[in-house]
């Protein structure tokens, strides 16, 4: 096998970002389906998705090669547990969106700093050992949870509404893309910035799909929306081939 191939992580392509946005939107509708539609609450919902997160991430780390279905199942698990965990912290614990976002941002930065200090790099191309992959998934979990809190804060507290929130995060992602193509800013920094921003985009988009008409949503069934998003992800994975990321030469 070519030693330059990272067999566990997909290459960062347009398809990667499309699937990431679909996964984060699914995380919002799926998380809300369990906690709200099933009326299980944020704590029970978080416990259920935490188990799924542990199972899929363990399987992903133990796998010897990159398997798209397994990878994206693990990532969807981070979005669902991120959704319910953020809602539990912000609402059930009474921390609020500002407090929850600040706490989660600190945890995300601490995870990245510890990863960089102990392993020497936080680039996707460095994800080649179980230890580094564990850092990768913990960092993703913090980023997904932070993104949920940011999305809710923007749409609810700041009064922008769901479509307003979607617009804000699309513009911010466009700015990150412009910086990627037009400047020499570290692509690793821009990757993680885009990774965080796609989560609140998915969170606000998911809320727009399933929240009541009176709140500015489309009032779609959370179950139907989740199944449609899951089917669309499955179609993309089946139709469009993905390659593993490669180390820089």
Image (spheres, helix red, strand yellow):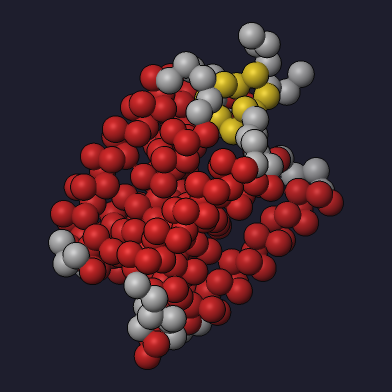
203 or 232, which is in the foreground? 232
Location of residue 71 in the rendering, given as x and y in whole percent from the top left corner? 47, 35
| Quadrant housing residue 123 | top right
Location of residue 248 with respect to 154 vertically, above or below: above
Relative placement, left or right, of 163 versus 242 is left
Residue 167 seen in the current view: yes
- Residue at the farthest right position: 182
Location of residue 137 in the rendering, given as x and y in whole percent from the top left corner? 42, 35
| Quadrant housing residue 246 | top right
The C terminus, quarter of image: top right
- Looking at the image, which residue is at 53% across and 25% down? 66
Residue 118 seen in the current view: no
Location of residue 90 in the rendering, given as x and y in whole percent from the top left corner? 28, 65
125 or 93, which is in the foreground? 125
Relative placement, left or right, of 220 versus 117 is left
- Looking at the image, which residue is at 69% across and 55% down? 176
- Looking at the image, which residue is at 75% across and 44% down? 185
Location of residue 136 with respect to 214 vertically, above or below: above
Location of residue 137 with respect to 62 vertically, above or below: below
The N terminus, quarter of image: top right
- Looking at the image, which residue is at 49% across and 69% down? 205
């Amino acid at each position: 096998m070519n030693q330059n191939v990272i067999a566990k992580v997909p290459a960062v392509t347009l398809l990667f970002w499309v699937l990431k946005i679909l996964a984060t939107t699914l995380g919002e509708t799926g998380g809300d389906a369990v906690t709200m539609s099933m009326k299980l609450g944020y704590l029970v919902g978080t416990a259920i998705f935490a188990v799924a997160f542990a199972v899929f991430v363990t399987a992903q780390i133990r796998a010897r090669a990159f398997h798209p279905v397994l990878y994206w199942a693990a990532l969807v698990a981070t979005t669902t547990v991120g959704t319910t965990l953020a809602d539990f912290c912000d609402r059930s614990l009474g921390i609020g969106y500002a407090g929850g976002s600040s706490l989660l941002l600190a945890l995300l930065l601490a995870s990245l700093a510890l990863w960089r200090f102990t392993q020497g790099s936080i680039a996707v191309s460095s994800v080649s050992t179980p230890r580094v992959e564990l850092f990768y998934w913990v960092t993703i979990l913090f980023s997904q949870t932070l993104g949920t809190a940011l999305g809710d804060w923007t749409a609810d507290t700041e009064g922008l509404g769901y479509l307003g929130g979607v617009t804000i995060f699309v513009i911010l992602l466009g700015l990150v893309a412009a910086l990627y193509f037009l400047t020499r800013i570290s692509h690793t920094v821009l990757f993680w910035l885009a990774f965080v921003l796609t989560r609140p985009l998915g969170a606000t988009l998911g809320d727009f799909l399933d929240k009541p008409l009176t709140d500015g949503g489309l009032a779609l069934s959370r179950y139907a929306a989740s199944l449609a998003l899951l089917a669309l992800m499955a179609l993309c994975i089946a139709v469009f081939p993905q390659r593993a990321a490669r180390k820089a030469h």
